[in-house]
Structure formats: structure tokens, C-alpha cells
Image (spheres, rainbow, N blue to C red):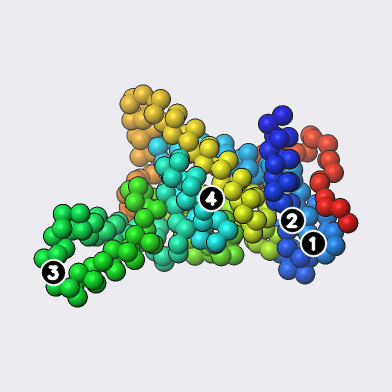
Amino acid sequence: MSDQKSLAKELVEAGVIFGQRRSNWNPRMKPYIFATKNGISIIDIKETIKGLLLARKFIAKTVAGGKDVCFVGTKRQARAAVEQYCAESKMPFVTERWLGGTLTNFRTIRERLRRLEELERLAETGDIRNYSKKMESQLAREQKKIFRNLHGLRTMTKLPGALVVVDTNREMNALLEAKALGIPTICLIDTDGNPDLADIPIPGNDDSMRSIDIVIRELCSAATEGRGERKAASPEDMAAAASAGAATGETESPNAPRPARRSTRSQFRADGRSASADAPRTEAATPNA
């Protein structure tokens, strides 16, 4: 409980409770808004903590089961935090631009990454100098472009087990691809976003660098814990999990047919509401007038 209190205090100090102006809100976010002050929607910190803890638990379980979690944060405020914490937790990420088909056409993405490795070998061995100056310049530009767009996905050899998104309005294409493939989504959503796009919504300010930093830090920490459990698992347990996935129709091949999506959003929300119904409602921290 003390950890949750300290986390809540840290989030409030980072400004995670400050949403968009009331005139720019999405009515679907009404359950997550505590009040309105000076024309600004104030997000219920209890809902933020509930979504964050639920997301941490889900990510740890997903990573422990042998699947990675892909983080998507292409907006300027999120890039530094996503790159830093994903590198520490060894999770794939996208911070430059979401290329159409990153998930739905994953085979092509892997081909481009193999092309990047080929160009890097040419540069390392010096064989690139065997080409003409014009061709050498073109190959260097191609390498730079592929690296800029896809370097965060180099370790993602199969489709991720979940997608973490900062700002649903900006990353709509990523969310639609994840929905088409039945990949669960975890989203940091401001009051102008649509929580129906997320399986696990984390209501909070998605424009504040400090609030984004804390949320991504906590989620990547859960991924690191999951990797530790994955390493501690015996080969027999991993083989049993793989056979169980095959029995239920889950496959690691990006081009294999996937089962119909069964959203667990209702289950998440039902659990969260039942947990919050027993707890007394406390006043959320609000700024001084």
C-alpha cells in the first residue's frame, strides 16, 4: 500500500492528473474524470493507478510466457523515455514513425531488417567501397533510413504479445493493426482519447514528459521482471507453455492464421470496478485556484 501511495504522489507531482480542456474532451472518458477546474478536466488518480497496476501485472505475465511487448511512442515527449527504458528492459519499440503494415505485414519488416544487416556488413568490412561513389552514397542513405525507422524492432523476431501505446489519437494505425491481429493493447490515454481502443486503459496526461516517463518506467520494470521469470523457468515449463499455445491455436508465425479476437477489456474493467467498489472514494489532488 505504501508503494502505491508513493507512486500516486509521484504521478500527481508529475502532472498526470491534468487532462485537456473541457471543450476538447471525449465523452467516453467521463468515467475516468474526477472533476473540472478552471476549464481543465482533472483525471481521477485512482483510475490511473488501477490501470497502471493492471498493466504491470499483464505485461509481467506476458513476458514471462515468452512473448515480448512492443512500445510505441512517436511523439516528441515520449521518445526519450521509450528509447531509454526499452533498451534497459530489452523490449522492442517504435519512436520514429509507425510504418503501415509493421504488424499486419511483419514478413516485409523482417526483410527490411535483414537488408539493414546486409548494408551494415558492407560498411564494416569495407566492401561498400567496391561500388561507385554514387551507389555508395545511395546505400548509405538507405541504411540510415532503415535504421531510423526500424532499429527499435531489431530484436522482435515474432509478433508481440501486447502493444503499449502513448496517445491513442496519434497512434491510431498501430492500434488498428493490433486489433486486426488480436494483440492486446495498453494505452496511456488523455481526456481527448477514446478508451474503447485500449484493452487496458491508463488514463493520464500524455503530453507531460514527466508523467510519460513514470508510466513507461513502471511498465518496462514489469517487463524486466517478466524476463527474469522467463529465464528462471525450466525448459520443460517453456515446452509445456508452447504446446499449450499450439493446442489453443496460438502460433508464433506472423503469417499463420490467428484465432478470432476475444477482447478481455470487459474482464479487466469488471475486475477493476469490483476492486474499486469496496474502497472508499477519496478526493483527488487538484491544483490550487
Which is more N-terminal, label 1 or label 2?
A: 2
User: In this figure, which residue is indicated by the disc labeled 4?
Assistant: 81
Dot 4 falls on a residue whose secondary structure is helix
Q: Considering only vertical position in the picture, is 91 above or below 231?
A: below
Question: How many other residues sit within 10 Å of disc 3, few (<14), some (14-19) or many (≥20)?
Answer: few
Q: Which residue is mark 2?
A: 18
Residue contact between numbered discs 3 and 4, judged by CB atoms under 8 Å: no
Q: Are marks 2 and 1 in contact (CB under 8 Å)?
A: yes
- Mark 4 Cα-neighbour bin, 10 Å: few <14, some 14–19, many ≥20: many
The type of residue carrying mark 3 is: Tyr
- Front: mark 1 or 4: 4
Find the distance from the CA under tag 1 to the CA under tag 4: 26 Å
Q: Callout 2 environment at 10 Å: few (<14), some (14 to 19), or many (20+)?
A: many
Mark positioned earlier in the residue sequence (1 or 4):
1
Which amino acid type corresponds to the residue marked 1 in the rendered image? Ile
Query: What is the secondary structure assignment of the residue under circle 1?
Result: strand
Between the C-alphas of marks 2 and 1, the distance is: 7 Å
Q: Which residue is mark 1?
A: 40
